[in-house]
Image (spheres, rainbow, N blue to C red):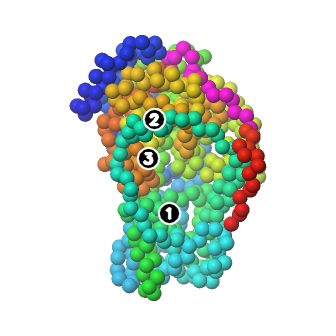
Amino acid sequence: MRALTLALFATVAAAPLAAQSVDRAAVNRIIDEGTNQSEVMPIAQHLTDVIGPRLTNSPGMRQAEAWTQEKFREWGLANVHKEGFEFGRGWSIVHSSVRMVTPRPIELTAIPIAWTPGTSGAVTAPVIVAPISKEADFARYRGQLAGKIVMVTRPDTGSEPDRAPFRRLTQQELSDHDFFEPAVNDPEAADRRLKRLDFATKLDAFLKSEGAVAMATMSSRDGKLLHGSGYLFGREQTPAVPGIEIAAEDYRRIARLIRIGQTPTLEVTSNVRFDDSDVQAYNIFAEIPGTDAKAGYVMAGAHLDSWAAGDGAADNAAGSAVVMEAARILSQMGVRPKRTIRFALWNGEEQGLLGSLAYIERHIATRAPAAGAPATGLSRFYGWNRRWPITKKPGYDQLAAYFNLDNGSGKIRGIYAENNPAAVPIFREWFAPFQAMGATTVAMRPTSSTDHYFFQSIGLQGFQFIQDPLDYGSRLHHTNVDTFDHLKGDDLRQASIIMASFLLNAANADKPLPKPPFPRQPKPTDPFAWPEQED
């Protein structure tokens, strides 16, 4: 804490005085409130240690929805409310265990796959390795799966890390982020992804028809890391066959035993609970009202939901805590910005950015309706950007800037300009007071896969911050070890200060941040490409 505080005050003292759009007196107050009165770590601790996993529509997520609203009201925020959107079933793990019974007893590291059914008590059955990754594989294993636990992932030989699991970005790496990335417009790409999404439903139906007891997959990472990710959360989508993910080391051991003729028997207990009492998921909002009703609003957001394997600390209690702490800092300062400052905690991000997409469709813009049945989940994510035209709503021109945080606990090192060169000099000016904190880079390249994505895809000013990776990608992302222990207080305090400053700058700027051109249906990047062969 002392080291961060000294660096912060050194930053203010050394910063140039020329930046006209940055209120340096306000920066001083933000720094003081964000260091000496910070609540970012208690916020993160409550979301993780106390509430725990926040799978969309799970009991933990319902607690988080209520608690975050309570905190916003406690801090004096205005218009605190939730907005619902159609999602699907709630699901949570009550208890689970997986044991190898023969040829010798071993407790295995495993977890139920989200939204798969339970086993109705302990189930004991032999295993079979049946790698199935496409429909053509069904014929190979037909008639062999009855009464068995089916291991559908092809065993590999393992992997060893080739870089340190915990790292910060070097200046060279930061420089490497700064490039213009032309869009690649492949009209068939989304269709190929959608076909792969259908495979999970077809695999479940095949396993059920063959009489399989359960399905087992191998974790995609070594180190006894588990994920348990699943996407069949709709009321009519729930799989029929229980699913478990087994740690890679345990999975390979079972496969090796099968290979030498000692077919193991597993005992699987998956006690899970579904909740259909409310199929709506809820985004949480709070505001600091602006003084000019015609000036619109700026917004910061992070996703509140997580997967169920860990406590969702780096992904994304960290970002949620930063957004909440920025709200607390600015509210405590009593700021009266020109534009309203809105704070958003999104739901359903892990299932396809569903919360932020619901907000956009309700308040900002819509696209042409999907052909056929309404798309849900990842089908909705992959298909939304391919529907034309975009139709603006009255709220389209009200949004002056959106800032997102969703890359773990690492300190902010810069921001992605999202191929918007007009925003680059503005952001460089806004970062000037924070150079000694390591926040210097304005990188031209675009990013995707989190809640700013659909904002910038419809021509709005949606931006994602650059953060030090720490151990986010190597160990924490979506895993069972994503717990409070891996959050770094100095980093999150720095991020909260910068988030609050950027919001205040954007709210008081003479003009909104420049928009990119309004999107039109693009032509194919390669009009001469041959279609890919189907498997």
Residue under the image location 39 percent in, 36 percent down: 171
Q: Is residue 289 visible?
A: no
Say left or right for 116 vs 121: right
- Residue picked out by circle 1: 113
Instruction: Measure the C-alpha gap from mark 1 to mark 2.
Output: 39 Å
Above or below residue 260? Residue 235 is above
Which comes before the other along the chain, label 1 or label 2? 1
The stretch of residues the image draws in magenta is 507-521
**Image coords of residue 249 (percent x, y):** 39, 69
**Image coords of residue 363 (percent x, y):** 64, 32
- Residue picked out by circle 2: 175
- Residue picked out by circle 3: 315
Residue under the image location 32 percent in, 23 percent down: 11
Quadrant in which the N terminus appears = top left
Q: Amino acid under label 1?
A: Ile
Most common SS among magenta residues: loop
Say left or right for 529 vs 357: right
Q: Is residue 158 visible?
A: yes
- Secondary structure beneath dot 1 equals loop
Q: Nearer the viewer, mark 3 or mark 1?
A: 3
Question: In this view of the protein, which residue sits in the foreground, 416 or 96?
Answer: 416
Instruction: Measure the C-alpha gap from mark 3 to mark 2.
Output: 25 Å
Q: Amino acid under label 3?
A: Asp
Whether pointer 3 and pointer 2 mark residues with C-beta atoms closer than 8 Å, the reply is no
- Secondary structure beneath dot 3 equals helix
Seen as rendered, the residue at the extreme bottom is 261
Question: In this view of the protein, which residue sits in the foreground, 227 or 433?
Answer: 433
Q: Is residue 515 within the magenta segment?
A: yes
Question: In this view of the protein, which residue sits in the foreground, 336 or 23?
Answer: 23
Above or below residue 137? Residue 8 is above
Mark 3, Cα crowd under 10 Å, few <14 / some 14-19 / many 20+, is many
